[in-house]
Image (tube, rainbow, N blue to C red):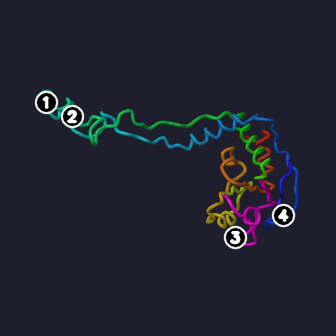
Amino acid sequence: MNLNVYTPEGAASTSKNYAIPEFEGDKGLKALRQVVLAYLANRRQGTSSTKTHSTVSGTGKKPFRQKGTGRARQGSLTANQHYHGSVAHGPQPRDWSQKIQKKLRRLALRRALYDRAVAGEIDVIEKWEVAEAKTKRFNSVVENIAPAGRLLLVDDSWSDGTALAARNIARLTLTEADSLNALDLCDYHRIIISEKGIEKLLSRANGGEAQ
């Protein structure tokens, strides 16, 4: 599949063919959906907590006598129907994490990579390198390729100077090809990846490295 390849200055240079896995029809879409939902679930902290009748602070004394007041009988002011009382059936801390099989994760990565490439939303840059590690200079390179939208920039490894130059640009997120996943590929308007980065990513997608 052909992708646009840009020079380190962001000028369009050539179109190059890459061995991106191809799919027919809906193959892999269910796996992609399942894996994306699992990644989102794994981000959840699971720390939501409400106080039950046994944990809410308050007296257990009966507020008034059972009969003769003309009011509904009450056994405790800490019951859930009272102000500052307990919460009935409220959320409690839990583990939301889901396990993802290696083959399923790889299939989802391949499908996400294919879909974004077909949509023309993946570009390649020869290498991430600026003459000086300045935010303005780095931003001009990125704007030459994609002037708008949230961008995911990928490299095989980031140098300290380049990472510092990019960190104050709000629409940019930097990641390495080893840690790129299907959710990352779905979550941004455009992906710009270095030649070394896409080689490593394609190796992962084809089973060359651990997922």
- Residue 134 part of the magenta segment: yes
- Give how far apart the Cα atoms at labels 4 and 3 are: 22 Å
Identify the residue at horizontal 44%, vertical 38% (top origin): 93
Q: Amino acid at mark 3?
A: Ala
Q: CA distance from mark 2 to mark 1?
A: 14 Å
Which quadrant does the C terminus fall into?
A: top right
Please report the bounds of the magenta region as a residue range.
122-149
| Front residue of this view, candidates 157 and 167 | 167
**37 in magenta:** no
From the image, tell me which residue sits under label 4.
12
The residue that mark 3 highlights is: 133
**Which badge, 4 or 3, comes first in the chain's sequence?**
4
Residue type indicated by callout 1? Arg
Q: Is residue 189 above or below residue 74?
A: below
Q: Position of residue 17 (x, y in %)?
A: 88, 50
Q: Which residue is mark 2?
A: 60
- Which SS class for mark 1? loop
**x 85%, y 45%: residue:** 19
Dot 2 alpha-carbon crowd within 10 angstroms: few under 14, some 14 to 19, many 20 or more: few
